[in-house]
Amino acid sequence: MCMNIYECVGCMISLQISDGVCCFKWSCVLPLFQMKVFAVTLLCIQLVTCSKILALFPYVGKSHHDVYAPYLKKLAARGHDVFVVSHFPQEQAVSNLTDISIKGSVPIASTQVLTFKEVEFEASVPNSMALSYLAEIHCTSILQLAKIRELVNERFDLVITELFNTDCFLGLIHILRTPFIYFSSSVLMPWANDRFGNPDNPSYIPKVFQPYSDKMDFLERLLNAVSTIVDKWIMYPLLIDLPGRHTAEKHLGIRLPPLADIAKRGSLILVNSHFSITKARPLIPAVVEIGGIHIDKPAKKLPQVVQRN
């Protein structure tokens, strides 16, 4: 018995069954060149696929949104189906981009003013306490939303989540069993490096919130080292990781491993920094600087005076 199971553009694949033995037979009447074109076309059809991406950006800060929003729009423009959890839904519909709005869920103004001087002169402990306070508000307010808990019933090819002041939303990623990457809208937080094994030697790499350069005197190095150690080994585990895990378990209804363990499963960090501003520092391949990615307008031409010089 012979059965044609595929026929297209002059080529045919037949299934032959004889004495209980099955075999495939390929026949084609196309010229050699057209056969090559046909084969390459089939290969391209298999390789060009679009992904279903969950973008999880729960922080209410408008400045954070302004960094990652153009990136997500570009992903959608390239054909990916992007589902965005944020406080800033699109004012006009964007093709392939679906907003899961959490606007109004966090009782903090998205444009609340905080000056650089106020941050700069705060010590590590007050800064970490402020971040943990914001983290608890965000975790409790957002994870209790039905639209967020229902995401565990969806299937995604990739999750992109912000790396900032809490890992409680990694509980959701743990349930989804989906590969994920981080997006940092600022320079790396102190607790970001260890999850990837990225070097952060405090003798010449100033910690975020510290007003130091890469050329510190002895006292500045000492203070920078102490501040980094306190944030990584005391403040983060006690004020961010542990409370975030308890909040996630409460609202997601499952027992979770330590969030620090889930955090290490991330594949990549896209960080909004650039060595021209933050100075040169060693970065592993999984940490990629993307400073300026949110600048989507065409560059203006330099004045003639500048060009001549």
Image (cartoon, rainbow, N blue to C red):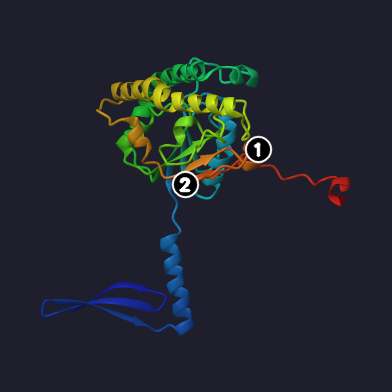
Q: Residue at x 54, y 24 (%)?
A: 223
Mark 2 and mark 1 lie on one chain; the one further toward the N terminus is: 1
x, y percent for residue 203:
54, 34
Q: Secondary structure at mark 2?
A: loop
The answer to whether any part of residue 91 appears in the image is no
129 w.r.t. 289: above or below: above
Q: Secondary structure at mark 1?
A: helix
- The image quarter containing residue 137 is top left
35 w.r.t. 238: above or below: below
Residue farthest to the left, as pictured: 19
Q: CA distance from mark 2 to mark 1?
A: 20 Å
139 w.r.t. 99: above or below: above
The answer to whether any part of residue 233 appears in the image is yes
Q: Please report contact status of discs 2 and 1: CB closer than 8 Å, yes or no.
A: no
x, y percent for residue 246:
31, 21
Q: Residue at x 37, y 43 (%)?
A: 156
29 w.r.t. 300: above or below: below
> In the image, what residue type sits under mark 1?
Ile
Q: In front here: 259 or 66?
A: 259
Q: Which residue is mark 1?
A: 277
The circle drawn on residue 286 is 2
Q: Residues within 10 Å of mark 2 (few under 14, many from 20)?
A: some
x, y percent for residue 200:
50, 37
> In the image, what residue type sits under mark 2?
Ala
Q: Residue at x 27, y 77 (%)?
A: 14
Q: Is residue 161 left or right of residue 252?
A: right
